[in-house]
Amino acid sequence: MLQLRPNCELCDVDLPPESLDARICTYECTFCASCVEHVLHDVCPNCGGGFAPRPIRPGVDRRPGLSRLHQPPASDRTHAKYTREEIAAFVGPIRDIAPEDR
Ligand SMILES: [Zn+2]
Ligand SMILES: [Zn+2]
């Protein structure tokens, strides 16, 4: 099940489960839309893959047992393990390759 992480790994802004600004990679690395656009250029600094908007999990049960009431967001904040300089060096050669070709 998808982990709904509470913050952007890079700038640490809050990304609550209902946020439309959350972006995730295939490994659930989570960043804000602004960092993905202006800093990461659609390159996940952890895996090199692209990003997609994080789907919103319903806040109430539309089907029994399936909502944030039963599968709540994660509480542990995650922080990037690379410096801004390391990220820029990693992103540079990858950003112009389409995600489907990486
Ligand atoms: Zn951010
Ligand atoms: Zn990733």
Image (tube, rainbow, N blue to C red):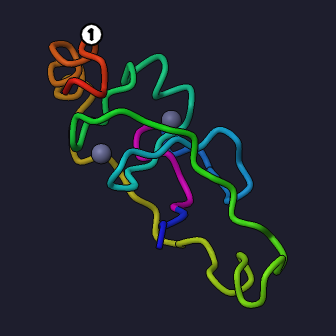
Closer to the camera, 85 or 4? 4
**In the image, residue 19 lies in the stretch drawn in magenta:** no
Residue at the far top: name it.
96
Q: Is residue 67 left or right of residue 49?
A: right
> Within the image, what quadrant is residue 56 found in?
bottom right
Q: Which residues are magenta?
A: 5-10
From the Cβ of disc 1, is ligand 2 less than 8 Å away? no
At horizontal 57% and vertical 40% (from top left) the residue drawn is 53
Secondary structure state at the residue bearing disc 1: loop
Crowd class of label 1 (few under 14; some 14 to 19; many from 20; radius 10 Å): few
Say above or below: 57 vs 38.
Answer: below
Q: Is residue 25 left or right of residue 93?
A: right
Q: Is residue 51 left or right of residue 66?
A: left
Q: Which residue is mark 1?
A: 96
Please tell me in which quarter of the rendered image ligand 2 is found.
top left
Q: How many marks?
A: 1
Say above or below: 60 vs 24.
Answer: below
What quarter of the picture does the C terminus occupy?
A: top left
Image coords of residue 12 (percent x, y): 50, 45
At horizontal 36% and vertical 52% (from top left) the residue drawn is 79
Say above or below: 68 vs 78.
Answer: below
At horizontal 49% and vertical 45% (from top left) the residue drawn is 8
At horizontal 60% and vertical 71% (from top left) the residue drawn is 73
> Within the image, what quadrant is residue 27 found in?
bottom left
**In the image, residue 6 lies in the stretch drawn in magenta:** yes
Image coords of residue 43 (percent x, y): 31, 28
Q: Main secondary structure of the magenta part?
A: loop
Image coords of residue 6 (percent x, y): 56, 60
